[in-house]
Image (cartoon, helix red, strand yellow):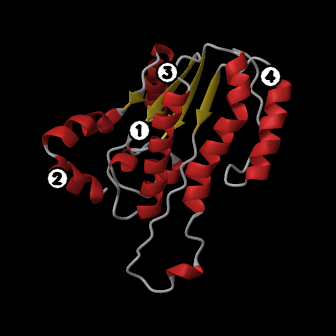
Amino acid sequence: MGAIHTYLCDVSDKASVVAFVALVSAAFLDIKLLVSNAGRLRELDFTQADLLQQDLTQEIRANLEGSIHITAGFLPALRASTPSRIIMVSSGFGLLPATRAPIYSASKAGLQSFTKALRRQLDGQGITITDVASPSVDTPATAHYQANKISPEQVVALTLAAAWRGQAEVYPGMARWLPLMMRLAPGLIARIVAKG
């Protein structure tokens, strides 16, 4: 296994993304895989007063705009290294929103829409895009939340296998039931996920 290089980047800040893309593109000439993974989630209750005093669009800047800017920045390198792959880490909440996290859910729904449109634009150019809609993953960020969680290692293994096959979507863990349940019992699954 080769060396690991780390760089600091605030994906919610376009200038930081531009600097990051320049650093990485200069250091690595053969970029075959881009993993766009940003997942800031806040629980916001829009029935409360004074919400407008808060920065309400943090998740949109990080989860959606950040992925759009990162992808745009690395597309030239990915085109130069075809066949190449993009993994977009969305969420089951992008398909069915969680009541407790309306802005997060909206940002991930936007990311899924962007991913589908981008896949059509890049068709035939040697770049495949895999959308991973994972359930709750067992990380420090979800330590406070009681739910059935999947391990990060399981998500990585399933996602990479799907990406190398050129699979358009992957639903790890309990999320694997979402597409089927959305067809068979859309109202029931929407109510279950809404509580999530």
Q: Which residue is labeled 3 in the image?
A: 163
Figure check: 143 above or below 79 = below
Camera-side mark, 1 or 2: 2
- Residue 138 vs 2, above or below: the answer is below
Say what secondary structure mark 4 lies in: loop
| CA separation in Å, label 2 and label 4 | 47 Å
Residue visible at 46% across and 26% down?
A: 159
Q: CA distance from mark 1 to mark 3?
A: 13 Å
Image quarter where the C terminus lies is bottom left
Residue topped by disc 4: 28
Q: Amino acid at mark 1?
A: Ala
* Marks 4 and 3 close (CB-CB < 8 Å): no
Dots 2, 4 in contact, CB < 8 A: no
For label 1, the residue is 133
Q: CA distance from mark 3 to mark 2?
A: 31 Å
- Give the mark nearest the N terminus, 1 or 3: 1
Amino acid under disc 4: Phe
| Residue at figure coordinates x 80%, y 28% from the top left | 25
Q: Quadrant of residue 169?
A: top left
Say which label, 4 or 3, has the lower sequence index: 4
Residue 138 visible at all: no
Q: Residues within 10 Å of mark 2 (few under 14, many from 20)?
A: few
Task: Identify the residue position indicated by label 2 in the image.
Answer: 187
